[in-house]
Image (tube, rainbow, N blue to C red):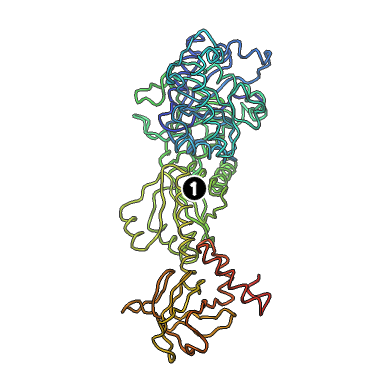
Amino acid sequence: MATRKVLLTVVGHVDHGKTSLLDKIRRTAVTAGEAGAITQAIGVSIIPIDTIKKVCGKLLDVFKGNITMPGLLAIDTPGHAAFTSLRKRGGSLADIAILVVDINEGFKPQTIESIEILKANKVPFVVAANKIDLISGWKNDPNKLLMQNISGLDYQLQGDFEKKMYELVGKFSEMGLQSERFDRVEDYTKQIAIIPLSAHTGQGIPELLMVITGLAQKFLEKKLQIEETGNARGTVLEVKEEKGLGTTLDTIIYNGKLKVNDTLIIGNIGEPIVVKVRALLEPAELAEMREKKSKFKNVKEVIAATGVKISAPGLEGTISGMPVRSCSGLAEEIEKLKQEVQEEVGQIVMECDECIGVIIKADTIGGLEALRNLLNEKKIPISSASLGDISKKDLSKLESIKDKDEFSGVLLGFNIKVPDDIVELAKIKNLTIITNNVIYRTIEEYENYTNKLKREIEMRELASLVRPCKFAVLKGYTFRQSNPAIVGVEIEIGRIKTGDPIMNNEGKRITSVKSLQEGKENVNLAQQGKQLAMSMDGVTVGRQIEEGDFLYADIPEDDFKKLKELKQHLSKMEIDVLKELAEIKRKNNPVWGVG
């Protein structure tokens, strides 16, 4: 067994300085050590512990020389790939993450999304509160450590800085997380450390590397134990076309050894892809692998943990984020590994014809997993999870689910395209598709949709019930005494509609609304404050009703119980009438409307 380097990923909102931070760590490392103190592999920057020691200097004295971690592997992924590709069985590929937040701008949509996904994958993280150099009046003495610099700032500037820091602490608190400036953290298992820094000047980078080293040393020791000699286990980071090589895979190997001519088994939606490794390529010297002009050198083998470009015939159709396994090529081994990778894919991609739940789609397996995890956290049921753009088949499945359950009849997509013909067809069939390139926004829009739908359903139900209503029979406005009685009424509270039953103030049903007339118009509904003519069968003015009487809508007991459940849609005055009516009814029947 050996101890591998810590897999570190950098996440956060676009333009908050993720790439600048990694670039600065690389440059600081090279400046602090000899040339080549940091090496570039595909998808990762390898920072040895000796380089970290040189950058951090006396800050690492606190460990008294007991550092077993061999260094960092900073995963270098553009944009969303940090989440959508970085996965392995049982969660994220990253051991630890740096969440970059612009201290001057605070939380943005992708900041929140990053936190949600880190929480869902249980990835520990620290916060790089970047761009402190842009705080007006900020000074940096490169010969001093961060905290000495901060202590030397004038009183007002320190106040401005503290205010920005505690705005971040407040935002984390809103998301149910405790955080604190790194030098004030009392318990790293309960509080997230915030390290103020500048990716531009490098101020705070030694402190950031110190905190990460400390966390890795204390909490990740067991996780870093790996087999260096066994077969390779890894994850496809990106699928690329390379001139002269065809389709290649930028892959992170997190366990074991991968050699040229090894057999490679790659997870897939249908049958796993099985290929023979033709070449393993690493960037030449310190070339940045994302640059088109990167030159590569051939290597015979790579040992975990590292990144490597794999060239092999038959890689077409490979999907980012898929699991990779290697073996010597024995048929028995291949079958076992095919089963293993497909089981792993099956935990994410699913199809259940009988299930009631939302349909989810994403562009990569990791994106799909992130969406699925967040929906599971919110206990939102899923009926199917698949990759790729929306098809007509998805719409017919959606239609069938909607017939059974309106709330589940929704398709949620992350980072996918909706073809124009699908948009049109969905409109015609009145189907709901919600897509966004920020995962939590997709879920937020779905929650807004379900809240609106719930309200619509409740309002439909409410419209079918007899609503609370108290009205006065106006004096001097008897237009007809009986057969039917027609009188002028004023709706004091609530509303009443044609057909609703009417009771007197003793709770006895005496008649119902035959018709309503406002001016010369016949209407079906009379609302609070209206004066209009009401006709009623089976009563005579002067006998069952008198001018000046207050009458009520006679709410059936079942309607009363439903109104109690829907009372958030009733006004305070309607609720008061409901209570008044219940008191009247309970004089004759003490348990009326109870339960």
* 446 vs 566: above or below: above
Tally of numbered discs: 1
**Quarter of the picture holding the N terminus:** top right
Instruction: Give 187 or 36, whichever is nearer the viewer.
Output: 187
Relative height, residue 255 to residue 144 (above, below): below
At label 1, the amino acid type is: Glu
> Residue 200's quadrant in the figure?
top left
Can residue 255 be seen here? The reply is no
Question: How far from the left and from the top, in percent, is residue 285?
Answer: 44, 16
Given residues 448 and 163, the one toward you in this image is 163
Q: Relative to 170, is 346 above or below?
A: below
The quarter of the image holding the C terminus is bottom right
In the picture of the structure, the residue carrying the numbered disc 1 is 271
In percent of width and height, residue 491 lies at 45, 72
Tell me where residue 539 appears, x and y as whole percent. Answer: 49, 89
Residue at x 31% of width, y 58% of height: 424
Badge 1 crowding class, 10 Å Cα cut-off, few under 14, some 14 to 19, many 20 or more, is few
Check disc 1 and report its element: helix, strand or loop. loop
Residue 156, horizontal then vertical, whole percent: 49, 18
